[in-house]
Image (spheres, grey):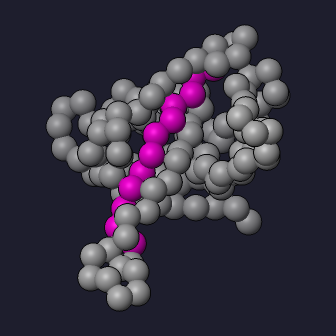
Amino acid sequence: MNHVELGGNLTRDVELKRVGSNQTPLATFTIAFNGKPKEGKDKPAAQFFDCKAWRDVAEAIARDAGKGDRIEVSGMLTQETWEDKKDGSRRSKVVVLVFDYQLHSGGPRREHAANKGAAQKEPTLHNDEDIPF
């Protein structure tokens, strides 16, 4: 089972781009929250999680959310790997692939729209031509 739910604040505005020959919408953003304080420290350590969303969910998050907004996401963990262009070493990072979200910030443009109407379907995995890494 691979399911994750996280809540925190957006560290910057959501970046929306279109990738591949089909121009599939892809949203990227980072969620931050305060974790437990490190041993011997009073101040909580900030935790940062990179997130990606595809298609309708990507467009909705980009439209509805902005820097500083409180957001909860649910999805799955994925591991991205690539070759470092400087030294040729293999690199990797874990990213949250977001299927659904809920905003907790007010304002007229912040109404959650990802789940209105038909139920959200999980994004399909893309072939290598659709993914830019």
Q: Residue at x 71, y 50 (%)?
A: 92
Q: Quadrant of residue 114?
A: top left
Residue 63, percent from left and from top: 36, 27
Tag count in the figure? Answer: 0
Left of 54 or right of it: where is 68?
Answer: left
Residue 91, percent from left and from top: 73, 47
- Looking at this view, name the residue that lies furthest to the left: 107
Whether the magenta-drawn stretch holds residue 31 is answered as yes
Q: Residue at x 26, y 45 (%)?
A: 68
Q: Which of 57 and 13 lies nearest the eye of the viewer? A: 13
Residue 82, percent from left and from top: 76, 39
Q: Which of 81 and 15 lies nearest the eye of the viewer? A: 81
Q: Quadrant of residue 48?
A: bottom left
64 up-or-down from 3: above or below? above
Asked whether residue 92 appears in the rendered view, the answer is yes
Q: Residue at x 17, y 37 (%)?
A: 107
Q: Quadrant of the C terminus?
A: top right
Q: Quadrant of residue 99?
A: top right
Q: Residue at x 37, y 70 (%)?
A: 45
- Looking at this view, name the residue that lies furthest to the front: 87
Asked whether residue 72 appears in the rendered view, the answer is no
- Looking at this view, name the residue that lies furthest to the top: 21
Q: Quadrant of the N terminus?
A: bottom right
**Dominant secondary-structure state across the stretch colored magenta:** strand
Whether the magenta-drawn stretch holds residue 46 is answered as no
> Bounds of the magenta span?
24-35
